[in-house]
Image (tube, helix red, strand yellow):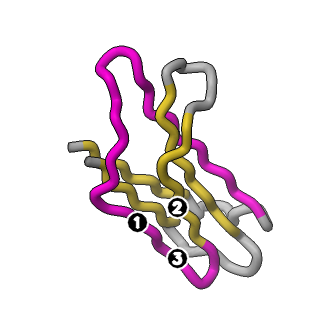
């Protein structure tokens, strides 16, 4: 099972948007298949998912995490926080 959370240290304003997409891949250098996504903006300051599953096979699968910031640059000192729990 997989859990994920997305937030920023100071919150987002205006048109700022952060999207984090999680991929299951069979190669470390080729983007795999998306199995979850989290998006936050000025009205949705935190996002999370619980109890998702995706099959990872030992040494042949990779968890890839892609973070895209759009709309406007984050202000200095506003860090993106992504948490992933695998169990």
Q: Which residue is mark 2?
A: 38
Q: Position of residue 25 (x, y in %)?
A: 50, 28
Residue 74, above or below 3: below
Secondary structure of the residue carrying tag 1 is strand
Circle 2 Cα neighbour tier, 10 Å, few/some/many (<14 / 14–19 / ≥20): some
Give me the disc on residue 45: 3
Which-is-in-front pick, marks 2 and 3?
2
Residue 56, by quadrant, is top left
Q: Residue furthest left?
A: 87
Secondary structure of the residue carrying tag 2 is strand
Q: CA distance from mark 2 to mark 3?
A: 11 Å
Residue 34, by quadrant, is top right
Q: Nearer the viewer, residue 74 or 19?
A: 19
Q: Nearer the viewer, residue 14 or 52?
A: 52
Left or right of 46 on screen, residue 68? right
Residue 52 drawn in magenta: yes
Circle 1 Cα neighbour tier, 10 Å, few/some/many (<14 / 14–19 / ≥20): some
Secondary structure of the residue carrying tag 3 is loop
Q: Position of residue 51 (x, y in %)?
A: 28, 57
Circle 3 Cα neighbour tier, 10 Å, few/some/many (<14 / 14–19 / ≥20): some
Give me the disc on residue 48: 1
Residue 43 drawn in magenta: yes
Left or right of 36 on screen, residue 43? right
Question: Which region shows up in magenta?
Answer: 41-70
Give me the disc on residue 37: none
Q: Which residue is pictured at 51% across the width and 35% down the height? A: 64
Q: Which residue is pictured at 57% across the width and 32% down the height? A: 32
């Amino acid at each position: 099972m997989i859990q994920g959370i997305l937030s920023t240290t100071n919150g987002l304003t205006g048109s700022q948007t952060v999207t984090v997409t999680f991929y299951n891949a069979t190669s470390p250098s080729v983007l795999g298949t998306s199995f979850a996504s989290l998006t936050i903006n000025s009205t949705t300051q935190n996002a999370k998912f619980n109890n998702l599953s995706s099959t990872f096979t030992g040494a042949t699968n990779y968890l890839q995490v892609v973070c895209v910031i759009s709309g406007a640059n984050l202000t200095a000192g506003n860090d993106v926080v992504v948490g992933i729990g695998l169990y």
